[in-house]
């Protein structure tokens, strides 16, 4: 019997998917190696704590917290019904990771609910982005702090999309994004924290990007997203999803949560555009977002 139990434990521990158990009070009792890899938190850091205690803090695509709203795991423990959905977990380094989760109740031999189990799968494009980083490093086209494409590469990519648009009529959009009140992070906490904020923002882009889109650092605290084959409505939805995920994430500095927001200008390429007119227009839209109160997206 102990041999069978040991085998089950090894299988669970070495699953590709993250797996954790909680008791009826949602206190974590088990946390496997994949959960460590996907979330950044070790088992020692989370076992014995509530799953809502600054750990995964799931949000949906609109930025709504599942810990204070309708938590699928809590619901499964309450009524015994399994559930599946896609959410965004909070990585230890601050960025959001899209995951597919499956939750169900745990029962004893008499069928009494004694807790819950969640299995979560990383559905981000990090593998594709890791390959892109290696390729860009070879060509010296990467921003070394954020590991995103640098401005030179962004400009080359936009130019190639103009050619693609001319030959095949494939549309594309641009997101120009600026960190709100970035100077206060440097002034109040120091440049190391400012660098952490830049990397935190970049990691959110990487974790939540489509494999065929490109995000880069335009300069300072400005970032650009080049979004292929998209219409205006979807560009607005995508930009607002990124904005909301960042707004509802945080980095931890000396046990304090530091929240960050971004303002965004968004536009689709137009028939008579040049790279200069495209950038000028999206820059003007970003300025409207900043002057209208920040933490918002303006699209034209």
Image: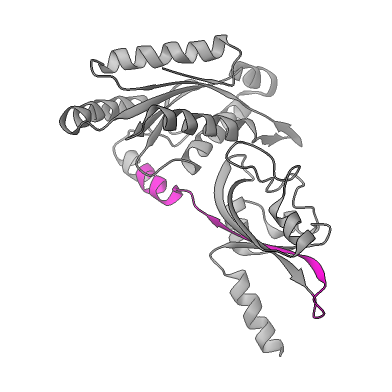
Q: Where is 67 relative to 266, above or below?
A: below
Q: Is residue 272 above or below residue 46?
A: above
Q: Nearer the viewer, residue 152 or 168?
A: 168
Query: Residue 110 in the image: x percent, y percent?
Result: 82, 79
Q: How is the image coloured?
A: one colour
Q: Position of residue 212 (x, y in %)?
A: 34, 41
User: Residue lying farthest bottom?
Assistant: 1
Please name the residue shown 46% across and 28% down the image: 236
Q: Observer-nearest residue: 100 or 233?
A: 233
Q: Residue at x 38, y 49 (%)?
A: 128
User: Residue at horizontal 59%, vertical 32%?
Assistant: 244
From the top left corner, tell me how far across and down residue 25 is, in percent: 84, 57
Q: Is residue 202 above or below residue 182?
A: below
In the image: residue 290, left or right of residue 143: right
Q: Is residue 40 left or right of residue 231?
A: right
Q: Residue at x 65, y 34 (%)?
A: 248
Q: Give the residues in magenta.
A: 108-133
For the N terminus, give its image quadrant: bottom right
In the image shown, does 289 or 252 lie closer to the viewer?
289
Residue 145 visible in the snapshot? no
Q: Name the quadrant containing residue 115.
A: bottom right
- Residue 124 is situated, as x and y percent measured from the top left of the image, at 48, 49
The C terminus sits in image quarter: top left
């Amino acid at each position: 019997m102990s041999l069978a139990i040991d085998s089950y434990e090894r299988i669970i521990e070495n699953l590709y998917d993250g797996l954790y158990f909680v008791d009826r009070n949602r206190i974590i009792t088990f946390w496997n190696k994949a959960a460590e890899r996907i979330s950044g938190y070790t088992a020692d850091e989370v076992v014995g704590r509530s799953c809502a205690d600054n750990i995964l803090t799931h949000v949906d695509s609109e930025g709504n917290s599942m810990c204070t709203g309708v938590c699928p795991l809590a619901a499964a423990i309450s009524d015994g019904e399994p559930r599946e959905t896609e959410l965004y977990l909070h990585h230890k380094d601050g960025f959001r990771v899209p995951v597919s989760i499956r939750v169900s109740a745990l029962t004893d031999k008499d069928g009494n609910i004694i807790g819950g189990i969640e299995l979560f799968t990383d559905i981000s494009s990090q593998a594709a982005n890791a390959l892109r980083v290696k390729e860009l490093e070879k060509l010296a086209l990467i921003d070394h702090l954020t590991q995103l494409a640098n401005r030179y590469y962004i400009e080359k990519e936009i130019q190639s999309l103009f050619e693609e648009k001319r030959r095949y009529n494939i549309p594309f959009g641009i997101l120009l994004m600026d960190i709100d009140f970035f100077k206060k992070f440097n002034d109040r906490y120091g440049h190391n924290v400012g660098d952490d904020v830049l990397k935190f923002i970049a990691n959110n882009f990487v974790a939540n990007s489509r494999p065929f889109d490109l995000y880069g650092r335009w300069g300072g605290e400005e970032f650009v997203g080049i979004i292929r084959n998209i219409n205006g409505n979807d560009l607005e939805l995508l930009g607002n999803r990124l904005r909301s995920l960042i707004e509802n994430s945080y980095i931890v500095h000396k046990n304090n949560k530091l929240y960050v927001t971004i303002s965004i200008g968004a536009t689709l390429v137009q028939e008579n555009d040049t790279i200069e007119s495209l950038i000028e227009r999206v820059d003007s839209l970003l300025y409207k977002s900043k002057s209208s109160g920040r933490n918002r997206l303006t699209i034209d």
